Image: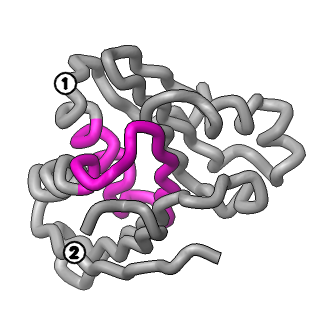
Amino acid sequence: MSALHTEILESDSPAATAALAGRVLARLPGRAVLALHGELGSGKTCFVKGLAAAMGLRATVTSPTFTLVHEHRGVRPLVHIDLYRIRDADDAMQLGLEEYLAGEGVCAVEWPERAEVLLPPGTVHLLFEVSAESDRRRITIRWPAGCAA
């Protein structure tokens, strides 16, 4: 099993959460899967918007809650997946999740616990938590071995 390193970051605004995404992106290998855990409104989609900006993508990033998958093409592709409406790994497999997870670029998965067994080794897990102050977020990152410190 790969060694894990845990890092805790704080954000006090949506802009700060988006900026943190750029810092995370800088530490990722060329192909990466990010599992974004957290309740509704905790900052997951805001984080993905920051990823897209840091990747130089001019796409409008919105939550793919109803479409399930948004693909953003660029030099380094970004696939944004929302499994909120998925029941389990079987449903996710019918969606073609395994192909997306094995694809090039960055794959950001919201509600990954719905298909946890399909996530590849080396997945970076981020837990978004809302503090008592509505704009503050605590983001706990579990880095697998192989991501730059």
Q: Residue at x 82, y 38 (%)?
A: 93
Residue 72 shown left or right of residue 2 in the figure: left
User: Is residue 61 positioned above or below 73 on the image?
Assistant: below
Task: Tell me where the magenta segment starts and ends, as one range.
Answer: 24-51
Percent position (x, y) of residue 40? 46, 59
Q: Which residue is mark 1?
A: 56
Q: Is residue 38 visible?
A: no
Residue 133 shown left or right of residue 52 in the figure: left
Q: Which element type, helix, strand or loop, lies under badge 2? A: strand
Image quadrant occupied by the N terminus: bottom right
Q: Is residue 117 magenta?
A: no
Residue 54 shown left or right of residue 43 in the figure: left
Percent position (x, y) of residue 91? 84, 41
Separation (CA) of disc 2 from disc 1? 23 Å
Q: Residue at x 57, y 74 (%)?
A: 2
Image quadrant occupied by the C terminus: bottom left
Residue 137's quadrant in the figure? Answer: bottom left
Q: Which residue is mark 2?
A: 9
